[in-house]
Amino acid sequence: MQNLLKILLRYSNFLVFIALEVAAFLLIVFNNAYPRSSVLSTANDFVAWQNTLVSEVSGYLSLRSENEALAAENADLRNQISSISSEQTGEDIHFMPAKVVQMTTDELHNYLTINRGSNDGIRVGQGVRNAEGAVGIVRTVGRNYSVVLPLINTHTNLSCRFTKNDYIGTLQWDGKDSRFALLADVATHMVVNTGDTIVTSGLSPVFPEGIPVGIVENSILNEGDSYYTIRVRLNTNFKRLKYVEVVQNAAQDELEELENGMD
């Protein structure tokens, strides 16, 4: 207590000065219209900024919730269409909505992680798509998360076909640009045009037939070559990928078991 009194006595002049300054400020503000309005205006500006910030954060959270709901609704709609289609094709295909929680796009061996795992029925080898088209193939599965190899991974191969004549080719990524991939194994006797539509072939249980993949950007045929070099602009924008659907084909296990039995 004695030490406190000594400190107060030592700085008493300074403390009195501060008290007088505060008192003078309050007298000016509350007895003069302009300073008072200026202070209140500043306070109002701060409150307005705070309210705007809260509103923007709330709007962002609301938009994210709406996007998740829309993704689930899209998957549900696709499942209804698939159910109707299965009556004609006999294929039992279900689409499980998922969210991308981690992803790379600038490496040779890109990957993405989704918030679905074995607890949701996800298994290795299932295809992954989004509203725009094909995305990739499930590589590893945990209980609640799975890692997917996207089309923009040099280890990913996808069987595709031209919608105009059903000609088959293999989509591969050259590791250069996440917007494009190369379509291989297309022989020179076929006419390839810019703008040709490429979709999944349906020749494996990973993807059903007809899921959009991309369009032909350009094709090169060098003298003496037996196959085209075809550059495809991918439908999926991997730089903005947030929501996907896992393709769950009820016949996948049986088909893969039969194919493995041929080895």
Image (cartoon, rainbow, N blue to C red):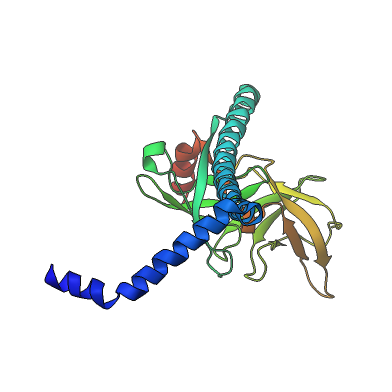
Asked whether 81 or 225 is in front, the reply is 81
Question: Which quadrant: the N terminus?
Answer: bottom left
Horizontal placement of 191 versus 119: left or right? right
Question: Is residue 68 positioned above or below 177 on the image?
Answer: above
Along the viewing direction, whichever of 38 and 182 lies nearer the viewer: 38
Count of all numbered marks drawn on residues in the image: 0
Closer to the camera in the image, 39 or 58:
39
Q: Quadrant of residue 4?
A: bottom left
**Residue 168 in the image: x percent, y percent?**
71, 51
Extreme bottom residue here?
A: 10
Is residue 168 in view from this perspective? Answer: yes
Q: Position of residue 163 (x, y in %)?
A: 78, 45
Q: Residue at x 58, y 64 (%)?
A: 105
| Residue 113 percent across, percent down from the top left | 47, 54
Residue under the point 57% across and 63% down: 153
**Depicted 41 relative to depicted 4: above or below:** above
Relative vertical location of residue 250 with respect to residue 53 in this rendering, above or below: above
Asked if residue 111 shows in the view, the reply is: no
When the figure is inspected, residue 164 is found, relative to residue 96, above or below; the finding is below
Near-viewer residue (136 or 73): 73
* Residue at 66% from the left image edge and 58% from the top image edge: 171
